[in-house]
Amino acid sequence: MLKIFLDIFFEYLIYDGYSCLYSKRYFPAQVFHIFWKRRLTSQISSVLLLQTQS
């Protein structure tokens, strides 16, 4: 379970770095970044919820 969390976290860090590079030039990247963060937040909360239930 922790491995899944770490995989998501590192994937998020990598994307965060790329979005910083691109968001200065491309507005759609910022919009996508917001959606991506929301998706990640819901993923993490569901993972943590599963952990507490099991």
Image (spheres, helix red, strand yellow):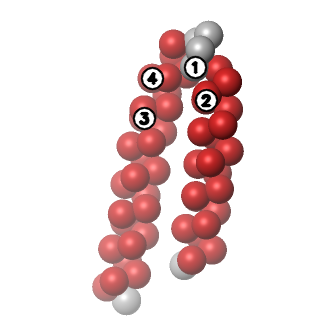
Q: Which residue is mark 4?
A: 31
Q: Which residue is mark 2?
A: 19
Label 3 with label 2: CB-CB less than 8 Å? no
- Image quadrant holding the C terminus, namely bottom left
N-terminal label among 2 and 4: 2
Which residue is disc 3 drawn over? 35
SS state under label 2: helix
| Number of residues whose C-alpha sits closer than 10 Å to that of mark 4, classed few (under 14), some (14–19) or many (20 or more) | few
- Whether residue 28 sits left or right of residue 3 in the image: it is left
Q: Which label sits on residue 2?
A: none
Q: CA distance from mark 1 to mark 2?
A: 6 Å
Q: In the image, what residue occupies the spot 37% across and 54% down?
A: 42
Residue 53 lies in what quarter of the image? Answer: bottom left
- Give the CA separation, mark 4 to mark 3: 7 Å
What is the crowding at mark 1: few (fewer than 14 residues within 10 Å), some, or many (at least 20)?
A: some
Badge 4 marks a residue whose secondary structure is helix
Circle nearer the viewer, 3 or 1: 1
Mark 3 vs mark 2: give the one in front. Answer: 2
Gap between marks 2 and 4, in whole Å?
A: 10 Å
Q: What element does badge 3 sit on?
A: helix
**Rendered-image quadrant of the N terminus:** bottom right
Amino acid of disc 2 = Ser
The answer for how far apart the CA atoms under marks 1 and 4 are is 9 Å
Q: Residues within 10 Å of mark 3 (few under 14, many from 20)?
A: few
Q: Position of residue 32 (x, y in %)?
A: 49, 27
Q: Is residue 24 above or below residue 16?
A: above
State which quadrant residue 47 falls in: bottom left
**Does residue 32 appear to the left or right of 45 in the view shown?**
right
Between the residue at mark 3 and the residue at mark 2, the CA separation in whole angstroms equals: 12 Å
Residue at left offset 39%, top offset 72%: 48
Asked if residue 30 is positioned above or below residue 38 in the image, the reply reads above
